[in-house]
Image (cartoon, coloured by chain):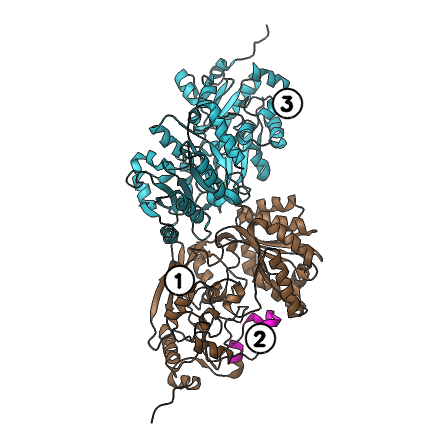
Chain colours: A brown, B cyan
Amino acid sequence: MTATPPTVQDLPGQLPDLDWIADPLRVGRLSQDFSWFSPVLKRDLAGKRADLAVRPRTEDEIRAVVAACARAGIPLTLRGTGTGNYGQSTPLHGGVILDMSGYNAFGWVRGGTGRAQAGIRLADFDAQARPQGHELRWLPSTYRSATLGGLFGGGFGGAGSINHGPLAAPGNVLAVRAMTVEPEPQIVELRGPEAMLLHHTYGTNGIVLELEVALTPAVAWTECIVTFDAFDPALEFADRFGSAPGLQKKEVCFLAAPIPDYFTSLADAMPRGCHAVMVLVAPHSEAGMRDMAAALGGTVTYRKTADEVEASHKTLLECTWNHTTLHALKVDKGLTYIQSGFTPARRIEQIKALEAALGGEVMMHLEFLRTKEGAFNCSGLQLIRYTTEERLNEIMQIYRDHGVQINNPHTYIVEDGKQNQLDPAVVAMKRRFDPQGLLNPGKLRSWYAQQPQEAARQTA
Amino acid sequence: MTATPPTVQDLPGQLPDLDWIADPLRVGRLSQDFSWFSPVLKRDLAGKRADLAVRPRTEDEIRAVVAACARAGIPLTLRGTGTGNYGQSTPLHGGVILDMSGYNAFGWVRGGTGRAQAGIRLADFDAQARPQGHELRWLPSTYRSATLGGLFGGGFGGAGSINHGPLAAPGNVLAVRAMTVEPEPQIVELRGPEAMLLHHTYGTNGIVLELEVALTPAVAWTECIVTFDAFDPALEFADRFGSAPGLQKKEVCFLAAPIPDYFTSLADAMPRGCHAVMVLVAPHSEAGMRDMAAALGGTVTYRKTADEVEASHKTLLECTWNHTTLHALKVDKGLTYIQSGFTPARRIEQIKALEAALGGEVMMHLEFLRTKEGAFNCSGLQLIRYTTEERLNEIMQIYRDHGVQINNPHTYIVEDGKQNQLDPAVVAMKRRFDPQGLLNPGKLRSWYAQQPQEAARQTA
């Protein structure tokens, strides 16, 4: 009698000591992220879910699950805490969710670098690093719950990218420890450019166990809101303060009217109809920031020192980046958003032209940053009054027609989000780390386009 | 019998407790700086000297000298340690040299800021700040002897300007304490933009007593030289590494062939005919820097850790900025130099075009930095095989014709160096701090153009 190959339902029996989650409601929740910001993804991903989830606590437990899945040909989808926006941790073909949030030990801080397990929450990492005089170079607005591995797997950067660029900039992520998906999983340390081949691939080409990242000296950031009566001086302030090399900051977020009105709990600081700039500024740079704001007619309407922020458990960081979208959606369910990257040398001209072309339907939310190469720039997380998918695509095309790069958050395919050709080395890495194509299948088109068997499964 | 007004020779008798210098040789030396880098300035400033010098040790001593000079109408020229290059501390009309190098107490470091008396040497400031976890944001190559007040009065920035821009960028210099030149001198604290009206005016519009500056967390910089066979990849490496936001550095200096050959003591690290890039890099960014260098065919030929640098008393910083010119002049007295500022968005194209147009006669030395507004850029301290003043002016015109800004180091007039219109507020500041026009007369054209009496004296 030949044994039938084990199915996903057999896994808990095979590995009874692990923390399995089979309850359909919980598995359903673990199959989702914040992709519901997009009405397109909400529709396209409806009903997509894992069969089972597991929350490993040790490398041995991860290895046991991975080996079992590899032997049985069961898809594996990695998940941090599900704060992403592209459905990157929603399995398209069932299988097992590998919830990494329990694999979260802090490693060390040495000199200007730190290391931890992938499932560590960014806030926990920062809390460990700060007493040693350092902090993370980038904090997405989701930093309280988001994991380091999740940020690496599907994120860009966040507050701090105005200094250090995105994670993808050389020197930010120094190394990863990664596991292959094979019946006998191997563990490999990748450093430098090779490590970056696993970045922003939605966990499709390797299981990242640990990350080593460069840090930056800790600062007790003061949080301020500066408001303006008009769009142009508000933009000029954000741009000028953001790029000023002598004024130390971690975040500059520009919210054109009427976006500030969505922040009902900050109504005292943001009078109706105002344009607002939210900043995190170093204490010794606050005076210079205020000089600049005053020169452009801005008013500092909100100020909290780092101690006050800590005591209040309320930070402006959780109003910026995609938290802006979240706050707006709480007030108006008819909104969605796009992500855009301006041309550094033409950013102001492009922003003003697009505000003129689409104002009213598209609300300008800009995050100031440095590009991977170091050019000062801003990216947009514009809010859209959603009507139809067709119109949404038209708006993105209007942006492209103005020379602006669109990073489409309405697709779950890695390549379609960036509209870039994928580096063939990324696919080669998948061949090395996931020869059976079990990791998050369906997300990396360059892979399944090369695999007739896989392509057949995609279209099934 | 009416008293004749006291002359400069009467001052030591009036104020016998001060440290006066009357020895003609010493006064002659104190009347000079490194303006001899320019054959034009060497000629134009020949024989210009003070009548007397004084080295005050306290604010009271400064006040006593200033009051006496104001009462007697005697010109006063401020001096740090004479490391400037524009003759800014060479008196055109005799009088007294106020040598500030003895007024040099370190004040304090608090948070990210520090304060000291103007005569402190930058190296001494840094040595005081480092145990408290901070360092200066900019170090000119003359930092061992140059004073903080001198840097503010006639300098630009230096190593570190690649992070924080020039001193002139808002937020770098936070405040100055300054004295007026009047029979009853007043002392005023100026903060923010107002303080900057005394910057880079060669001590013509106020006597700076103390400076408060923003600092940056101390780093144990590793010093490296990377050499290349060809101009283009060396330039690309310097530019790419310099702008990389994830790779922490304090200095990137590009020396096209044949400049490296002038550094005879570094011949082992810089093979004849090579193009070299000298860098100060943070230890955790060294691997990323090496990856970038290797990808462009560069070889790391020299490496010293911060400890090794300290033990050897030899730093690459003293090969960069205008020390490059000094080293070259030691080998070839027929050289001089120019200072140029490229257009950030066109820098590479401009550099290559000018290398093609003038290579051989003009040797490309570039210092990478951020502009006052924060744009990544480089400035040139190109070495010139000097023939005639006419040809030197032609070369500068060829640079301008390529859209490059020339900061002319062959003039001692504040306005002519920058070819900018002077902010009228600078002249207003002089009216407030030096109503009699006694400070370093002849250097600020916008002032003496407004003063018929003064203009007459200039042409006398």
Residue type pointed to by label 1: Ala
Residue A388 picture location, percent across and down: 66, 70
Relative horizontal placement of residue B95, taking residue B261 as reference (left or right)? right
Question: Is residue B12 on the magenta stretch?
Answer: no
* Residue farthest to the bottom, as pictured: A1
Q: Which mark is residue A262?
A: none
Report the span colored magenta: A27-42
Spatial separation of the CA atoms under disc 3 and disc 1: 64 Å
What is the x, y in percent for residue B338? 46, 31
**Residue B84 position in % (x across, y down):** 45, 29
| Residue A36, magenta (yes or no) | yes
Mark 1 to mark 2: distance in Å?
Answer: 31 Å
Q: Which mark is residue A195?
A: 1
Protein chain holding label 2: A
Residue A314 falls in image quadrant: bottom right
Labels 1 and 2: the sequence-earlier one: 2
Q: In which quarter of the image is residue A63?
A: bottom left
What amino acid is labelled 2 in the image?
Answer: Asp
